[in-house]
Structures are given as C-alpha cells and as structure tokens.
Amino acid sequence: MKQRTAAEPPKDRRRFSREWTGAGDFCLFLRVLTAVLAAVLALTPITGARALTLYTASSFAGEDDSAVTYVNLLKAFEAEHGCVISDQSSASSERWKQSVLNDFAAGNEPDVLFFFARGADSVPILSRVIPIEQLNREYPDLNLPVSEALREADGQVYAVPVRPFWEGLMVNLDLFEEAGLALPATWDQLKDAIRVFRGKGIVPISVSLTDAPHYLAEMLIQACSTPEEQQARPRSAEEVPASWIRGMKLLRELYEIGAFPENAALVDERTADELFHSGQAAMRVDGVWFAHQMTEAEMNRTAVLPAPRYGEVQGPVSYIGGVSMGFYLTRRAYEQPMVRDEAVALLAYLTSEESRAKLSGGSLTGSLQQSAANLIASDHLMLSPIQDAMNATAREIWLMECVPAVAEGRMTAEECWERVMQLQPFGQ
C-alpha cells in the first residue's frame, strides 16, 4: 500500500483548495467590476441619474398664440436642468377649469400650475398652493413679483401674473364699411347692424351659447349697468340689480332677431372662432387672447369696441379687464424634498421677465392695436368680470344652463337669477 507523503494533501483537501482558488478569482473579478462601475458613476451627471419628473398644467394650448412658446420654454428648462416635464395643458374653457379643480380635489394636482387667481375659481385651491411672499423669504434670490391685483381675501398672493387681459366687442371693419354701417356704440346701432348682416347672409355675432358664452353674457349686463351695478355682488335674488335682469332679457332679444349662428347652442368655441376669422361673421365678443390669434391682415381689418350702451345708462366708458391668471407652486411639490427646489426653479423660470414677455401673446398691430389702446385708455374704467367672483357651481348654472335656456325662451331672465342666487354665488 502506497504511503502518503506529507507534501501530498488528502484528496478532499486538494478539492477544497481548487474550489477556494476559484472563489478567490471570482472575488477579484467582483472587486475590479465594482471599481469600474464606481468610476463610471463618478463620471455620470447626478441630474441624469435621478431623471426627476415635474408635472405642469396650463391653458397655453389650442389656438392660444403662446402655446408653442410655452412648450418651447418647458423644453429649454428640461435641457438645462436634466429633468422631464409632463405637461397637461388645454385651451381655457369652463370644462378645463372644472377639470383642474377636480384634479386638486382628487389629490392629483400638478407641481406648477397656470390658473385663475383672485376669484371663485382660485378659492378651492388656496390651501394647496404656496404664498409668493413665503417663497421669496425662503429663496431670497428669487424676487418673484407680488401683484396686489392678485391678493386673495385671506391677504396672501399665491400666483405670479403673466397676462393682463381685456374683453370687448370685436368688429370686422371691412364688412361694416361694405354695408355702410356705423360701428355700434349704442344698442340701437347694434340691432341695426344685426338686421343688415342677417339679411346679407352674414352671421352678425359669432358665439357658442354652451361652450364659452361668458364674454357675451358679461357684455350684455355691462351694456345695461352703471359701473356700481356691474360690480354689485348680491346676496339674494331680491338684491340682484334690475340691469342684470335686463341684460339677460337682451340675450333673448338678440336670439329672436337672428344675431347668432344657426343652432348656436350646438356650435362649439372653435367653430365660432373660425366664423369670425374667415369673415363669415361680422362681430365677436371676446378677449385679448382671441386678438393674439389673428394674422396681421386680420388685425388690420378688426377693431375692438366697448360694450354698446343700452338706453340712458350713465357713467364713464368701461371695459371688462384685469389680471386674472398666474403661475402657482403647489404644496404637493413644495413638501417633496426631491421635487421642491426644481419646482421652485421652474416657477421662477416661467415667471422671469423674459418668459413673461414671451408668454404675453405677442404684439397687436394696425386697427386692432389702435382700438385696443383706445379701449383701455386711462379715462376708461376697468371692471372685473362678474363670473370671476362667483363660486364654480353658480357660474356653471348661469353660463352653461341659463344662457342657452334664456336665449331659446325656455327660461325667463328672472327665473335665471332666482336659480343662480339659490346657490349663493358671492357667499353669504
């Protein structure tokens, strides 16, 4: 029997030795791989690694002249900060307003929001957004503008304004000239123009009675009201000014003399816009955002006028206007440490002087520019819209239910305001 020498390890030991040597090689491989990965990570930008996503929402969409500008601003911020922005913007409408409020109610609000301020629309979101003064204290280098025009009832300013606005009666100057008509400064002149254009097969006033009827409804009440009456905020049906009832009656009168497109309750806002753009409609009640959608040629043949006076209404010339929208930072973004600084940076970027200039909608030219300057002249009184002071439910009833019903004769003006005032539109 062969004797085992001291130098010869047992078979079990030899097997163990070979296995141990293989494990050592593998450990060395892991150490090398770890070192390589660490070197790669050291060279990788932190922003690229985290791929933070910010959520935004606005009304810079559709036909808005600044829609492309807004998208380009978001892309530029993404490129500079290495983040991703998920934007949910839609053209402004009653449906869009409600969808934003629904998102807040469900806890799905964005990080940065462009929305209405200092009105019934903003009240439901105020507890979920951060005051601008607080942001300026905590980020001293921001210097975000604090607009007194957007100070809420609680004394705080939550939004940085971007666009002041005005509303008025827009007219196609070429069509009025061809018809030999005076531009409507009074209710009688407006009715004469409606009859003439209807006889020529031209839509007198392009409007959707169920998509965005608020400009028309506001103008009709303004036409009948003194500034004090227009700015009244009644607490009961008995307190509703007679001029508000008269204004809704004028809506029915316009409908009866053929002022609106056929089936105006079925026409959507886009179609109503196009009727005026294409010269198929002589007039349109709208705001500065609609003006910015026009080509230079359209601006040269368009003028904007104050609401035509009804009867012997006294007081200075007035127009509907203000600063109704701005950018917000939500509390949801603020309370997430990984999101907060980037969301604040985005808010500051979108509200910088340069960005605000780009989002202003561009400049007006020609007849439209001159008439707009006349509309908002220093001796003209700016009035805030009635609807901006209403709670969302009452506003919805007034504009989306009462307006088409009163126009079509299915509801009286008195019944309209009885219905609206039951909802305490301006608080108790």
Image (cartoon, rainbow, N blue to C red):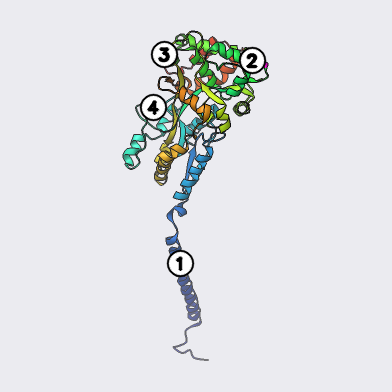
Question: In screen coordinates, is 131 left or right of 57?
Answer: left
Task: Identify whether 62 is placed above or below 314.
Answer: below
Q: Which residue is mark 2?
A: 196
Write down the region rendered in magenta. Answer: 195-199
Q: Which residue is mark 1?
A: 36
Task: Identify whether 237 is placed above or below 362.
Answer: above
Residue positioned 46% across, 90% down in the render:
5
The reply to whether residue 232 is visible in this rendering is no
Residue type of the residue flagged with mark 3: Glu
Residue type of the residue flagged with mark 2: Val
- Which one is nearer the viewer's eye here, 361 or 370? 370
Numbered mark located on residue 274 in the image: none
> Quick one: label 2 or label 1, which is nearer the N terminus?
1
Are there few (<14), some (14-19), or many (20+) residues within 10 Å of tag 3? few
> Quick one: label 3 or label 1, which is nearer the N terminus?
1
Give the percent coordinates (x, y) of residue 360.
Answer: 47, 34
Q: Which residue is mark 3?
A: 228
